[in-house]
Amino acid sequence: MSKNEEAMDDFDVDKGLDDLGQRPKRRQKTKKKMLLKKAADDKVVVKVNSFGVHAGKEWTELTNYIGVLVRDHVSIVHDEWRHVKVKLKDEMWNHLKELFVLSDNSKKHVLATMSVAFRNFKSMLRNDFIYQHAHNLEKLALPPTEYKQISKKEWKLFVKKTFSEEFVEKSQKAKARRKKHKLNHRLGSTGYGGLLVKK
């Protein structure tokens, strides 16, 4: 057991995932000002290019909104996206269809985008708010003020998991794999489909 993991042992994690897997019902739906102004019959049409790939500024808009949606509604205590309840994934998918014109064939792609957004959000939290204060437990006691949707209990569990031997080992293996990659993904939210459109 690492020193950081030992120091975090006083955190109550036994109740863990069961009561933290989903946001409280009282939390309002994620909203984005520009989308709120749109009428119900004025949805954003997400285009598909000749390669059958989502593309264009509408897809970028959807991708950005997905990031907000995932941050607000999916608990960071889930180790992986596949652990998130199907019911919650379906609720988010249905919410997106209220704002965007999406075919049912798009669901798999959209859920995959949610998965990436979830992973990126947790990675950002670790890099910007945990690793920088690894030797200052006082600063790790409370969640970042920028993300009020994260409860103290969720944050404590997330920090404890970050310093666990299991996660550290998994993280080191992932870093080693990335070093072997000769080409890095640099397409941003536009994605490969957007690149094809520009060409």
Image (cartoon, rainbow, N blue to C red):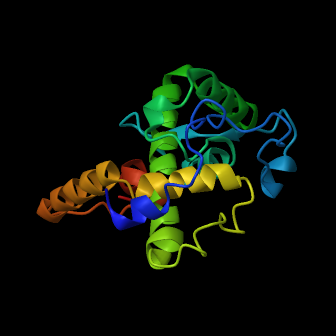
The answer to which image quadrant residue 173 occupies is bottom left
Front residue of this view, candidates 44 and 95? 95
x and y, in percent, of residue 68 in the image: 65, 52
Give the residue displayed 54% in from the left and 44% down from the top.
77
Give the residue displayed 11% in from the left and 61% down from the top.
180
Q: How many marks?
A: 0
Image position of 56 (left or right of 174)? right
Give the residue displayed 52% in from the left and 35% down from the top.
110
The answer to which image quadrant residue 176 occupies is bottom left
Image position of 105 (left or right of 179)? right
Q: Is residue 190 visible?
A: no
Give the residue displayed 57% in from the left and 34% down from the top.
17
Image position of 6 (left or right of 158)? left
x and y, in percent, of residue 169 in the image: 24, 54
x and y, in percent, of residue 151 in the image: 71, 52
Q: Quadrant of the N terminus?
A: bottom left
x and y, in percent, of residue 41 in the image: 83, 33
Q: Is residue 101 visible?
A: yes
Front residue of this view, candidates 50 and 85? 85
The answer to which image quadrant residue 195 occupies is bottom left
Q: Quadrant of the C terminus?
A: bottom left
Front residue of this view, candidates 18 and 62? 18
- 149 lies above or below 102: below
